[in-house]
Image (cartoon, rainbow, N blue to C red):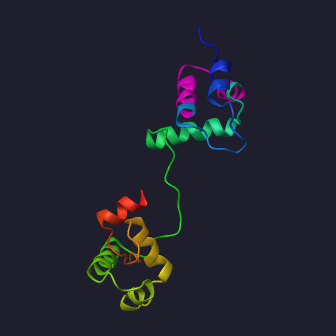
Amino acid sequence: MVNLAEIGAKLTAGRQPGQELSPFARAAIVGAVAAGASQSAVARAFCIDRKAVQRALQRFESSTSFGAKPRTGRPEVLIRREKRYIIQLAKRKPRLSIQMLTDTLDTRISRSTVRRVLRQHRMRKWRAKKRIPLTKAVARERY
């Protein structure tokens, strides 16, 4: 028979107070309560608060998932169509600077937003320096 305290200690080892439980720990908590262990016994075995056990059970009952929910955050300024338009414009007119590109777009978009969209698509607004072509003779002299 597996000891519940051993499982709890292994699954919550290195967890800071207030830190989110891992999906494995949540699954073990739900399994232990389903197997007949009391919520307080599970809380003691996992070294967590009884309320955390209750939240893990409620989350499993509502979503039947052990993973974390997506975090809320600031809504994005641009929709996908606007991002596509920025990328198309940058590809069509590679000589435009970020400032000129921002000026041709809608007024509510900042330079940092345009730069972020371009960076997400691995595009940069710079041009390589023109260099003199390297001939084979010069290359041999260098190496």
Picture layout, residue 100 above or below residue 36: below
Tell me which segment is drawn in magenta: 26-44
Q: Is residue 81 above or below residue 58?
A: below
Q: Is 130 situated left or right of 73 in this image?
A: left
Q: Report the residue at 48% width, 83% height from top.
A: 110
User: Residue 84, position in %: x, y?
Assistant: 30, 73
Image quarter where the C terminus lies is bottom left
Main SS of the magenta part reads helix
* Quarter in which the N terminus is drawn: top right
Q: Position of residue 83 (x, y in %)?
A: 35, 74
Compared across the picture, whether 6 is left or right of 125 comes to right
Nearer to me, 18 or 44: 18
Q: Is residue 28 magenta?
A: yes
Image coordinates for residue 57, horizontal then vertical, percent: 55, 36
Percent across and percent down for residue 34 are 53, 24
Q: Is residue 16 left or right of residue 70?
A: right
